[in-house]
Amino acid sequence: MPALYAPGEPRRSRPTRAGSLTGVDIRIGITHSPRELSFESSQTAAQLESLVATALESGASVVKFSDDKGKVYLVPAAAIAYVEIGSDSARRVGFVA
């Protein structure tokens, strides 16, 4: 049986259990780009909505997003076409009839 962790490698936390609360799904459309930016954030939907609204109202040059894995995304505020924020809900596992 292979070792789960290499010697000297820090142990990582276990994945979340099925049905536990995960993050919020975010999709950002960027003008003049055929693809959208899509990721999952650990922030709440209200926090993300406030972040985007504040950045656009204040005339900020970039909006800073971070996902639940620690990656940071800097999106030019002037290039944001839309922001779709999913709801805070538990992820379903299995078959739904």
Image (cartoon, rainbow, N blue to C red):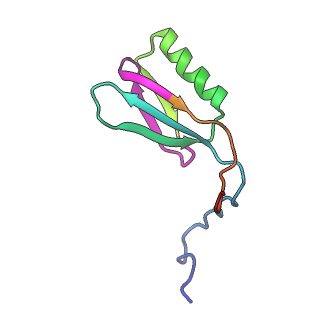
Residue 72 among those drawn in magenta: yes
Q: Where is residue 51 shown, x and y percent of the image?
A: 57, 23
Q: Where is residue 36 shown, x and y percent of the image?
A: 38, 36
Q: Is residue 54 above or below residue 7?
A: above
- Furthest toward the front, the residue is 97
Determine the residue positioned at 65% across, 64% down.
14
Residue 32 among those drawn in magenta: no
Q: Quarter-wise, where is residue 10 in the image?
A: bottom right
Indicate left or right for 47 with 28 as reference. Answer: right
- The magenta stretch spans which residues? 67-83
In this rendering, the count of numbered labels is: 0
Q: Where is residue 48 shown, x and y percent of the image?
A: 59, 28
Which residue is at the front of the view, 35 or 94?
94
- Furthest toward the top, the residue is 58
Determine the residue positioned at 56% across, 75% down.
5
Determine the residue positioned at 51% across, 17% down.
55
Q: Is residue 48 above or below residue 23?
A: above
Q: Quarter-wise, where is residue 87 in the image?
A: top right
Indicate left or right for 67 with 37 as reference. Answer: right
Q: Where is residue 23 shown, x and y percent of the image?
A: 62, 43
For the N terminus, the quadrant is bottom right
Q: Quarter-wise, where is residue 54 in the image?
A: top right
Which residue is at the front of the view, 80 or 96?
96
Q: Is residue 54 above or below residue 95?
A: above
Q: Is residue 3 above or below residue 96?
A: below
Indicate left or right for 29 with 94 as reference. Answer: left
For the C terminus, the quadrant is bottom right
